[in-house]
């Protein structure tokens, strides 16, 4: 899983920006919502119109900047359940925009079965990308944990954006199709892992 390493890099790279925004009086919630609006706009305008290279690069930068709101909340001592809820909800919207943009691109630019397959896999990834964090959140709401799985959010976004970039740079569209298929399998496996973990904990004597 890449989430921990990516978070550490983002903290080191964008710490100065977080401190600057705090000094300017910008709130973490403002950064959260603004980042989602920018990411969704980029995904739904650049990708469906065939600007894959630009889309992947812009979205990659915005994904890294997604760490800013958390850093700002820690710097100002304003971490809260509301902030965590808002951040998670906005993440789901941004992720949906990315995979929807890929699906629309596939239907517009790829012919026949390949276009339909790629778009279908993008939608499968979209759905499973919502189920993965839901399974963890639901487990925690029941007093259990589900901190297992291959496909965390950072991993899912890295895979799809790298594949989009490679296709934008001239590789065959099938590269993106294969990447989406692997991502769908990894996401489905993650859901099953979390279900199994929670099932074990829910048994009498199961460890939380």
Image (cartoon, rainbow, N blue to C red):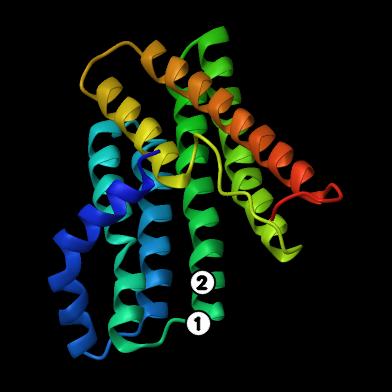
Task: Judge the density around disc 1: few (<14), some (14-19), many (≥20) Cα neighbours within 10 Å.
Answer: few
Name the foreground residue: 68 vs 192: 192
Instruction: Give the answer, above or below, for where 14 lies relative to 192.
Output: below
* Residue at (27% x, 29% y) in the render: 165
Relative image position of residue 156 (x, y in whole percent): 44, 37
Q: Residue 125 or 43: which is nearer the viewer? A: 125
- Residue 170 marker: none
Q: Position of residue 51 (x, y in %)?
A: 29, 34
In the displayed structure, does residue 57 sit left or right of residue 94? left
Name the outermost residue toward the front.
205
Q: How many marks?
A: 2
The quadrant in which residue 123 appears is top right
In the image, 107: left or right of 208?
Answer: left
Query: Relative to the observer, which residue lies in front, 160 or 186?
Result: 186
- List x then y, in percent, for residue 202: 81, 50
Quarter residue 49 falls in: top left
- The quarter in which the C terminus is drawn is bottom right
Q: Which residue is mark 2?
A: 84
Residue at position x 25%, y 91% in the image: 25
- Residues under numbered marks 2 and 1 in contact, where contact means CB atoms less than 8 Å apart: yes
In the depicted structure, whether residue 137 falls above or below residue 109 = below
Q: Quadrant of the N terminus?
A: top left
Taking the spot 52% from the left edge, 31% from the top edge, the residue there is 103
Q: CA–CA distance between discs 2 and 1?
A: 6 Å
Tag 1 secondary structure = loop
Q: Give the residue at mark 1.
A: 80
Under circle 2, the secondary element is helix
């Amino acid at each position: 899983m890449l989430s921990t390493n990516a978070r550490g890099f983002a903290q080191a790279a964008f710490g100065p920006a977080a401190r600057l925004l705090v000094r300017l009086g910008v709130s973490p919630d403002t950064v959260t919502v603004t980042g989602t609006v920018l990411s969704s706009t980029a995904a739904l305008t650049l990708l469906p119109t065939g600007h894959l290279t630009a889309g992947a690069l812009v979205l990659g930068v915005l994904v890294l900047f997604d760490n800013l709101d958390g850093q700002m909340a820690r710097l100002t001592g304003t971490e809260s359940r509301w902030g965590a809820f808002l951040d998670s909800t906005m993440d789901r919207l941004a992720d949906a925009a990315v995979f929807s943009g890929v699906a629309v691109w596939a239907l517009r630019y790829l012919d026949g079965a390949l276009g339909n397959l790629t778009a279908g896999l993008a939608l499968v990834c979209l759905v499973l990308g919502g189920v993965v964090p839901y399974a963890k959140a639901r487990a925690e709401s029941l007093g259990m944990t589900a901190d297992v799985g291959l496909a965390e959010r950072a991993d899912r976004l890295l895979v799809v954006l790298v594949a989009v970039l490679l296709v934008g740079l001239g590789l065959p569209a099938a590269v993106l199709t294969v990447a989406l298929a692997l991502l769908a399998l990894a996401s489905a496996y993650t859901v099953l892992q979390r279900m199994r973990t929670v099932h074990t904990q829910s048994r009498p004597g199961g460890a939380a």
